[in-house]
Image: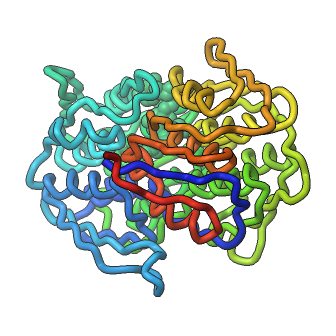
């Protein structure tokens, strides 16, 4: 197994190209199940989770073909064609689903198209219990019968799904996506209230509309979907990864450097940008992306609370904590989305961070200097937080279990090296 070795203390300087968003790509790939024509997605990131979804779709009968690179330097994302002429298998097995929680996104489209779907209960990052009850109650509202038995969810609607009014009891990104996918082929009108509003959901809706779906209220918490008999193929470019962009913005800030995030969209990371500005970091739109710089200013402590979009994303909480570990003063970080998303704390403490935990709140007293140490990644974004801490620390940091990183960050060490970091991937002996 590989590990990442970082010799800290180098300011980042240069251009980092931001890839396509993993969290947009996964539901978009699942959308291919809704039509017998090809869905062609460009700007697809090269990540382990994308391969897992491609394998899952493949075993449902989707013809998956990689159509080379969509950019000219070989690094600008790939194009993938997904053609579900016939769904040959409506079951998503444990072996594939356990690798990635987002696999459950095949449930809505398969039951909508085939009248039946059986999907293993998902696994994924160890950041809380993460149930799928909302996905299931929403499908029930659309007329599906749901049974959960022996680790599998079986949804059936032999006469097809029916439009309904459904109020999400809690904002859920995945459940909103699953139910949007399902409602596109339901008979009649569906009204969703308290839907998640993440940009990835807007990206999904835009692609579905290009495939012939009728969706009103895109980008808001109330979505009205008028079911259609069939959807057709389309071409769609996946939005840039806002979490990758936010992570590298924080990497620039923690090292006191200056980077341009090529292809990133500042309007997708407004809340994170507002917090970065309060730390003393400059962040603004520039030609073709986002410009981030913190030169000659001290990092100031800022409190943060995670909440659904457009508030500060939980997926940037761990990275922001690394930043606050070296800021002047005290900051309070409150995690409201997941109940167990502080697993990076003991690892950051090994590097000298002063953090106390109480319930869903972490209080940090910034230290002058973090120190390199061997640390262990526990989940995807926690891994990124340890890398950021390593960039700012003195000495050598080695991050183990980086398969978590490979699920969500494309060529991380290469991108960081380009802007001057001393980072390498080495075999863990
Ligand atoms: C998605 C993102 C993930 C991000 C999260 C929150 C993808 C592939 N993953 O995950 O990176 O951290 O949104 O922004 O897009 N919940 C329930 N019942 C359900 C569904 C969710 O109680 O049926 C709870 C979850 O346990 C969690 C909260 O709702 O506490 C939000 O989860 P959700 O928005 O569904 O996250 P994911 O879609 O899994």
Q: Residue at x 36, y 47 (%)?
A: 403
Residue 77 position (above or below residue 333): below
Whole-percent x and y of residue 147? 20, 22
Quadrant assignment, res 422? bottom right
Question: Percent from the top left, x then y, of residue 150?
Answer: 14, 21
Q: Is residue 313 left or right of residue 273?
A: left
Q: Is residue 180 left or right of residue 199?
A: left
**Would you say residue 187 is visible in this rendering?**
no
Q: Residue at x 54, y 59 (%)?
A: 423
Q: As drawn, is 294 to the left or to the right of 35?
A: right
Q: Which residue occupies the foreground of this view, 71 or 63?
A: 71
* Residue plotted at (15% across, 53% down): 60
Comparing 158 with 322, the one in front is 322
Residue 57: x and y in percent read: 22, 55
Compared to 41, does 104 lie above or below?
above
Residue 352: name its quadrant: top right
Indicate whether 365 appears above or below 198. Answer: above
């Amino acid at each position: 197994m590989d590990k990442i070795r970082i010799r800290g203390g180098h300011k980042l300087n240069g251009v980092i190209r931001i890839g396509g968003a993993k969290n947009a790509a996964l539901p978009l790939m699942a959308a291919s199940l809704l039509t017998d024509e090809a869905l062609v997605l460009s700007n697809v990131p090269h990540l382990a989770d994308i391969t897992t979804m491609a394998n899952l779709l493949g075993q449902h009968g989707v013809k998956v073909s990689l159509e080379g690179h969509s950019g000219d330097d070989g690094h600008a994302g790939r194009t993938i064609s997904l053609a579900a002429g016939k769904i040959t298998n409506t079951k998503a097995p444990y072996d594939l689903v356990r690798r990635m929680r987002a696999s459950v996104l095949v449930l809505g489209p398969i039951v909508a198209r085939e009248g039946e779907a059986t999907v293993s209960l998902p696994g994924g990052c160890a950041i809380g219990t993460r149930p799928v009850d909302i996905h299931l109650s929403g499908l029930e509202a659309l007329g599906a019968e749901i049974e959960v038995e022996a680790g599998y969810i079986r949804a059936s609607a032999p006469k097809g799904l029916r439009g309904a009014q459904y109020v999400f009891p809690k904002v859920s990104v995945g459940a909103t996506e699953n139910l949007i996918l399902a409602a596109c082929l339901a008979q009649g009108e569906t009204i969703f209230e308290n839907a998640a509003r993440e940009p990835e959901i807007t990206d999904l809706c835009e692609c579905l509309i290009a495939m012939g779906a009728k969706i009103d209220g895109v980008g808001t918490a109330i979505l009205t979907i008028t079911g259609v008999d069939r959807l057709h193929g389309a071409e769609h470019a996946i939005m840039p990864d806002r979490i990758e962009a936010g992570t590298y913005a924080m990497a620039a800030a923690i090292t006191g450097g200056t980077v341009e995030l090529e292809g990133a969209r500042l309007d997708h990371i407004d809340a994170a940008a507002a917090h970065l500005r309060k730390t003393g970091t400059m962040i603004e739109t520039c030609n073709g992306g986002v410009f981030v710089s913190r030169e000659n200013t001290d990092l100031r402590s800022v409190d943060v609370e995670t909440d659904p979009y457009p508030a500060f994303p939980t997926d940037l909480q761990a990275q922001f904590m690394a930043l606050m570990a070296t800021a002047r003063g005290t900051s309070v970080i409150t995690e409201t989305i997941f109940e167990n998303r502080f697993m990076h704390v003991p690892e950051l403490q090994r590097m000298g961070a002063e953090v106390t935990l109480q319930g869903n709140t972490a209080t940090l007293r910034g230290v002058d200097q973090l120190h390199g140490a061997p640390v262990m990644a526990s989940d995807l974004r926690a891994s990124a937080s340890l890398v950021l801490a390593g960039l700012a620390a003195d000495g050598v940091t080695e991050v183990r279990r980086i398969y978590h990183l490979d699920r969500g960050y494309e060529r991380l060490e290469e991108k960081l090296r380009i802007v001057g970091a001393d980072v390498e991937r080495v075999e863990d002996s």
